[in-house]
Image (cartoon, rainbow, N blue to C red):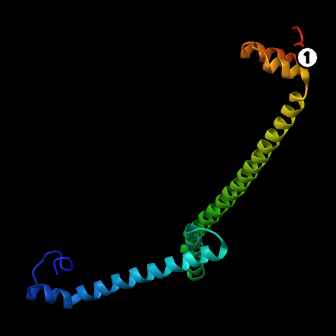
Amino acid sequence: MAEQFAGEPIKPQNLSEWRAGGYRDWLAEEDRVEHIRRLADYAFSLAKASGGNLSEGAAAVAGGKLLQLLEAAESEQVVPVSIALAKLRDSDARMASAKALAARLAQRERELALAEQRFRRETAELFLKWYENEQARRIAESNDKPAVKMDRLIRLMFGDRPHA
């Protein structure tokens, strides 16, 4: 009971206030919460059906509400409702732009993954090609320091560096 009445003891005055309007206020609040819950469920189902997210579903609900307001609006209300609708449309455009960017980024990631696979394959092919080269194998198996081996292998594979 402490939860429901904020720790207040039940007195005749409390019951009188409850009957005089508190109960109606409580019912109105419960109806408002239930209405918001139904709207949220509806927004979620719209988003799910369109493959979007909850904010997109909520925007669809908001758009519908704005259109209802615009249809019933008096002339002085048309401008504010139209501004709200324009902001919603701007938000839609930004969302579309963000989706397009995400698609381009995903495409770029796929391209990079393919390039990496190609690089690995080509590197392995080159390794096999140079492993079969007797001179390269002698350089690799020599007792020279790694830096010397690298320099000799680079000269073998690519020739001498041009002089500046």
Q: Which of the two residues, 13 or 48, is positioned nearer the viewer here?
A: 48
> For residue 28, which quarter of the picture?
bottom left
**Type of residue at label 1?**
Gly
Q: Position of residue 138 (x, y in %)?
A: 84, 18
Q: Which of the two residues, 19 or 121, is positioned nearer the viewer here?
A: 121
Q: Quadrant of the N terminus?
A: bottom left
Total labels: the figure holds 1
- Label 1: how many residues lie within 10 Å, few (<14), some (14-19) or many (20+)? few
Q: Is residue 104 left or right of residue 63?
A: right
Going 71% across and 53% down the picture, which residue do you hit?
106
> Does residue 92 sit above or below 131 in this rendering?
below
Q: Position of residue 156 (x, y in %)?
A: 89, 18
Going 17% across and 86% down the picture, which residue do you hit?
17
Q: Quadrant of the C terminus?
A: top right
Q: Position of residue 31 (x, y in %)?
A: 38, 85
The answer, for residue 25, to whether it is visible in the render is yes
Q: Read off the residue under disc 1.
A: 159
The answer, for residue 74, to whether it is visible in the render is no
Q: Is residue 135 left or right of residue 80?
A: right
